[in-house]
Amino acid sequence: MKNSTLAIWLEHCLEFINQAEDPLSAVIFEGVLHAADTGHLIMLESILSGTAHSAVAVNRPLESLLNSIYITKMVIWGRLEAEIDPAQAWDMSVGLEILFQEALIIATDSYTKALAESHQRHAVEAARLSQEAEQKVMGYATELARANRELARLEQAKSDFISIAAHELKTPLTIVQGYADMLLEQELARVSEKAQTILKGIAVGAERMNDIVNDLLDVSAIEMSSLVLNPEPVVVGELFQVLLERASHVARSRQQTFNVDIKTDLPIIQTDPKRLYQVLDQLVNNAIKFTPDGGEITVTAYHETEAKTGADFIKVEVADTGIGIAPEDKEYVFDKFFRVGKTNLHSSGKVKFKGAGPGLGLSIVKGVVESLNGQIWIESQGYDEVNFPGSTFHLRLPVQKNSEE
């Protein structure tokens, strides 16, 4: 006998295998651990004893576990051949084969069980996280809905305030402007030169305030969808003639080149002439206002037929060589109270263009144009108060002939 101790232990293992229902108890594998003296068996023992299957089995592929069992078996067989007489080794190898076959089964089952438990834990954790996320989303949705309601309330309150303030200012302004005009017409010769200057200042200021009040009333009407329209047959060319005669005079006072190209074949359309004039006047005035002295404004109007539908339109383009619009500002240019560029540039005289107003004009333009079933948009290469890339406003109005024609 080369190794009597190992032989005795193996005989004990075989006897235990023949008697025990579970041939892979912790007792047997504790002995195998010492007999094989290999790190592979340390892992195997912990797997089969149930002490660490989650930590080991799940973190190692099943193929790796089975390979470890096979290596352990080969180590023990190697020691049998080296340390035990061949006759005894053969009998013991049969028992060991049974033991390792059981090991393969238990290792596979343990791995499968551990993997299932891991999946279950992950599923439970995923469900918990999903529930928490759902609760958070519901909370955010509730908060967002509340914020939207509050925003709508504030927006409505602002609109109500604008409407009320405009109506309250309208009456006293009308009185002030009326008296100022009356004094200028009837009593101007009787007052001193200084008083005349004061009266003219009052009249101009009252007129300016009255324009702002009218703009506020228009904004309120547009927001409440109560803008009054009085459509009638309109000769657009004649409307332009009145508008451009006044606008060209303002442009000449600033040494601006004023180009006009109004086609003579513009059709008569059914629209509100007052509101259309308001839109065109605002676009042309903006072009003059935001173009430096010596710049250029071009107004074009022509008849357009859409190829796909055959629908007729009047297309108006107002182009300038002014400060332009930044790309990020294009989506806001028709918003209430939006002003292009830096406020100080509109009033400090750093560049040669007239200052901006309260920022209501283009908002009203868009509201009126949409009420007239038209479209309006802007093109610009960007904002530059030094090189002046300019802007072009495009207005498109449908031709709706008078039903009596």
Image: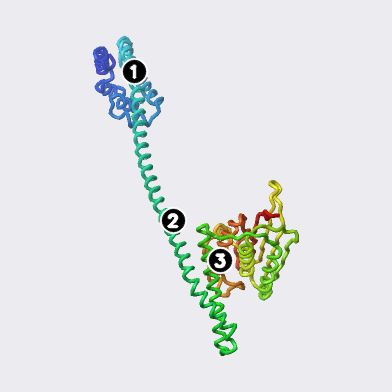
Q: Which mark is residue 100?
A: 1
What amino acid type is highlighted by mark number 3? Gly
Residue 294 quadrant: bottom right
* Label whose residue precedes the other's in the sequence (2 or 3): 2
- Circle 1: element type: helix
Kindly identify the residue that appears in the image at 72 percent across and 67 percent down.
259
Of 281 and 299, which appears nearest the observer? Answer: 281
**Would residue 172 appear left or right of 320 to someone viewing this image?**
left
Residue 296: give x, y in percent of width and height. 68, 68
Q: Residues within 10 Å of mark 2 (few under 14, many from 20)?
A: few
- Image quadrant occupied by the C terminus: bottom right
Foreground disc of the pair 3, 1: 3
- Name the disc covering residue 306, or none: none
Residue at image x 66%, y 57%?
270
Which residue reaches farthest front?
A: 404
Which numbered disc covers residue 341?
A: 3
The residue to which callout 2 is attached is 152
Gap between marks 2 and 1 measured at Cα? 75 Å
Q: Amino acid at mark 2?
A: Ala
Side of 7 where 282 appears, left or right: right
In this rendered view, identify the residue nearer to me: 365 or 74: 365
- Going by the numbered disc 1, the residue's amino acid type is Phe
Q: Is residue 26 above or below residue 381?
A: above
Q: Position of residue 159 (x, y in %)?
A: 47, 62
Displayed quadrant of residue 23: top left
Q: Looking at the image, tell me whether mark 2 or mark 1 is earlier in sequence order.
A: 1
Q: Nearer the viewer, residue 82 or 126?
A: 126
- Nearest-to-viewer mark from 2 and 1: 2
Category of crowding for the residue at label 1, using alpha-carbon neighbours closer than 10 angstroms: few (below 14), some (14–19), many (at least 20): some
The CA span between labels 3 and 1 is 84 Å
- Residue 179: percent from the left, percent from the top? 53, 80
List x then y, in percent, for residue 219. Answer: 52, 62
